[in-house]
Image (cartoon, rainbow, N blue to C red):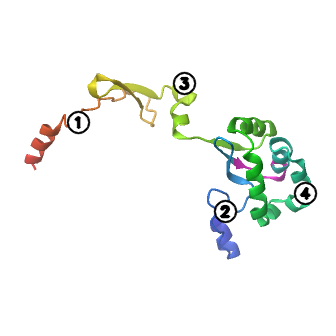
Amino acid sequence: PYLYQTMFSGKTPGRSSQRHSVIVPYGLYQAKDGSVNLAVQNEEQWRKLCRVALNRPDLAQNERYSSNEKRVALRDELEPLIEQIVAKYSVAELEKRLEEADVPFGRVNDLPYVAEHPQLRAQNRFIQIEGPDNRLLETLVTPFGLQNLPQRADAVPGLGQHNAEILASLDDL
């Protein structure tokens, strides 16, 4: 949409960091213990967000915010207000409220959360390999999901373990 907006209106949208430049609210919002990505795409979702998820029906009834165009024009006023409301909830509380409201959203996962995500385990996305000092290490299998092909999982070499072989191969160059 940004390219078309520029091509057909002659106006280049400004950068909006982790927020959508032509839809409000849409983007990352900080909860008590993490972030969620809101994706409000129409007026019904806006009303549900306000009434159910944010517990602020007054925002849904406010004529000043009754269309996306109006919300975009009032972005500097509205987004800090939404941020203030969202910050009162934990991510889990907010997810529950957003699901109940049927408003599109996504949890913003940090790497520790992703590493322990139940779907990675359910899909058998980890294998064990031998690490230095014969310790077992867990690693992800190839992301390509090639069925019926063995996963190569060589042991992790110790520091300097292959130095002599590598240096000898350089003599051949």
Residue assigned mark 2: 1
Which of marks 2 and 1 precedes in the sequence? Answer: 2
Identity, as a three-letter code, of the amino acid under mark 2: Pro
CB of mark 1 within 8 Å of CB of mark 4?
Answer: no
Which comes before the other along the chain, label 4 or label 3? 4
Q: Amino acid at mark 1?
A: Leu
Report the front residue among 157 and 168: 157
Amino acid at dot 3: Ala
Q: Are marks 1 and 2 in contact (CB under 8 Å)?
A: no
Q: Which residue is mark 3?
A: 122
Are circles 2 and 3 on residues that touch, CB within 8 Å?
A: no
Residue at 77% over, 52% down: 82
Q: CA distance from mark 1 to mark 4?
A: 65 Å
Label 2 Cα crowd, 10 Å radius (few <14 / some 14-19 / many 20+): few
Numbered mark located on residue 62 in the image: 4
Between circles 2 and 4, the one closer to the viewer is: 4
Disc 3 element: helix
Q: Position of residue 38 (x, y in %)?
A: 71, 48
How far apart marks 2 and 3 lie (CA) works out to 37 Å
Q: Which residues are magenta?
A: 38-45
Residue 135: assigned label = none
Crowdedness near tag 3: few (<14), some (14–19) or many (≥20) residues, C-alpha within 10 Å? few
Residue 12 vs residue 110, the one in the foreground: 110
User: Which element carries disc 1, helix, strand or loop?
Assistant: loop
Q: Position of residue 107 (x, y in %)?
A: 64, 41
According to the picture, the residue beneath numbered tag 1 turns out to be 159
